[in-house]
Image (cartoon, rainbow, N blue to C red):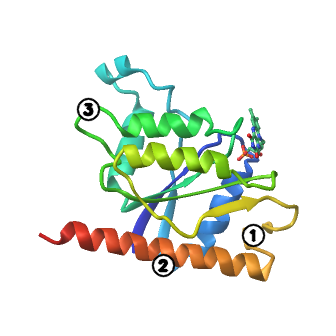
């Protein structure tokens, strides 16, 4: 089964994006394994730190490199991506010549209480990741407006239509990962 590293761009214990990531992990069960990347000890990017890389950075790079794909679950801050999300992108892209993103299949989703559900942040993240060489899933786009009760305590999606839509996203993401893998193994 394909391993997906899940990058949640929020450090908050009660993060709605973390909750959303867990709901997606549940929908992916049996098809892909979602592993949450621990960002609690990843410092702000500083090129000097490569001289003696912090354990959190080495672990992040290891997990990204070992993953078959990456799922970005990003909040929107001030109509952009939060520093937490960008920090992961920057660490992953270095050291020079060891870009963890090159050729990596990935998808972007995100949730906010606002009606446009992180659309602006996702558009910005999309352009950053394309520049890093990530192979992004184009459709479906997932702009998830958080509403009370939509994600149950067991991380199931309460509403049938929403569940079906998100299950469709998971299926397309899984297909995308296989397509990218097949293309990169073709001589
Ligand atoms: C600094 C800051 C800026 C924010 N800007 C936006 C925004 O531009 N658009 C939006 O939909 N929500 C915005 N929000 C609200 C977040 O969507 C909300 O706090 C959300 O819960 C953050 O995600 P998290 O729960 O996963 O941490 C902002 C929140 C903060 C703290």
Residue 96 numbered tag: 3
Residue 94: quarter of image: top left
Packing grade of label 2 (10 A; few <14, some 14-19, many >=20) is some
Residue 57 numbered tag: none
The residue nearer to you, when weighing 14 against 131, is: 131
Residue 129 as seen in the image, left or right of residue 119: left
Check disc 1 and report the residue beneath it: 154
Residue 1: quarter of image: bottom left
Check disc 2 and report the residue beneath it: 31
Instruction: Please tell me whether residue 143 is drawn above or below residue 133 in the rendered image.
Output: below
Instruction: Please tell me whether residue 182 is drawn above or below residue 99 in the rendered image.
Output: below
- The first of marks 2 and 3 along the sequence is 2
Image quadrant in which the C terminus is located: bottom left
Instruction: Please tell me whether residue 21 is drawn above or below residue 95 in the rendered image.
Output: below
> In the rendering, at what x and y percent does residue 73 appear?
60, 53
> In the rendering, at what x and y percent does residue 129 appear?
44, 47
Tell me the distance, in whole angstroms, between the alpha carbons under discs 2 and 1: 19 Å
Tell me the distance, in whole angstroms, between the alpha carbons under discs 2 and 3: 34 Å
- The first of marks 2 and 1 along the sequence is 2
């Amino acid at each position: 089964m394909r391993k997906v590293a899940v990058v949640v761009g929020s450090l908050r214990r009660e993060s709605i994006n973390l909750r959303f990531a867990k709901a997606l992990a549940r929908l992916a069960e049996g098809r892909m394994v979602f592993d949450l990347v621990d960002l609690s000890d990843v410092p702000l990017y500083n090129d000097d730190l490569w001289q003696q890389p912090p354990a959190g950075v080495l672990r992040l790079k290891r997990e990204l490199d070992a993953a078959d794909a990456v799922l970005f679950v990003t909040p929107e801050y001030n109509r952009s991506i939060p520093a937490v999300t960008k920090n992961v992108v920057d660490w992953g892209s270095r050291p020079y010549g060891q870009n963890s993103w090159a050729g990596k299949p990935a998808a972007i989703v995100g949730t906010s209480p606002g009606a446009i559900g992180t659309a602006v942040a996702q558009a910005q993240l999309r352009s950053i990741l394309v520049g890093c060489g990530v192979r992004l899933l184009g459709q479906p786009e997932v702009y998830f407006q958080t509403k009370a009760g939509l994600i149950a305590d067991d991380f199931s999606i309460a509403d049938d239509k929403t569940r079906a839509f998100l299950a469709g996203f998971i299926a397309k993401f899984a297909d995308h990962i296989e397509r990218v893998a097949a293309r990169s193994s073709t001589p």
